Amino acid sequence: MKETRIWEILAEIPDPEIPVLTILDLGIVRKVAFEGEAPIITITPTYSGCPAMQRFESDIKEAMTKNGYEGTEVPMVYDPAWTTDWITEEGRRKLKEYGIAPPEESSADKKALFYEDDIVNVTCPRCNSKNTKLESQFGSTACKALYKCNDCLEPFEYFKCL
């Protein structure tokens, strides 16, 4: 029962960079355990240099304390490495509704990281056209790229496949 409550609390913690997503939508929470009454919440970074990881850790500890759980530990594990495959279907839906194209390729296809035109056909989150063009491999955060739709002419960000 107490593990279920921890998962419910975690489901309310937003991603600090994309607030429509929760940390559960991103798939960074790997395990919930307890040492006595203190929760141990294991997370995996989205990538090794992600600046949000310290924020995730402090947000998790703060949420646990607010809900009566003291002494929460938040260890990070790097194996297996996080991939965009871990983003939930709900998370992908939320990204699209927010105007960010969710990852379209499986992370098993590393060619997608190099944005080869025949590999990454990014769907515009506004009009659903695949007639899009990469404008910049760098968006507002390191995990996003900037695209433009050639049909509706709107720019949009794409959550890069990893």
Image: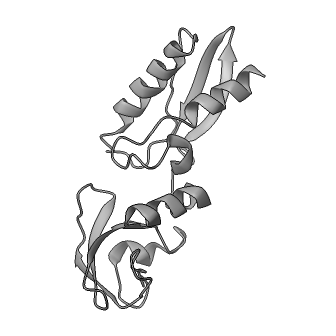
Residue sitting nearer the eye, 33 or 101: 101
Q: Residue at x 30, y 86 (%)?
A: 152
Percent coordinates x, y for residue 109 in the rendering: 51, 75
- Tell me the quadrant of the picture where the N terminus can be found: top right
Percent coordinates x, y for residue 38 in the rendering: 61, 12
Q: Quadrant of residue 115?
A: bottom left
Q: Residue at x 48, y 26 (%)?
A: 60
Q: Quadrant of residue 14?
A: top left
Percent coordinates x, y for residue 86 in the rendering: 57, 55
- Tell me the quadrant of the picture where the C terminus can be found: bottom left
Residue sitting nearer the eye, 68 or 81: 68
Q: Is residue 124 above or below residue 102?
A: below
Answer left or right for 127 relative to 89.
left
Q: Quadrant of residue 88?
A: bottom right
Residue sitting nearer the eye, 20 or 30: 20
User: Quick check: can you spot residue 162?
Assistant: no
The structure's colour scheme is: one colour
User: Quick check: can you spot residue 41?
Assistant: yes
Q: Residue at x 68, y 17 (%)?
A: 34
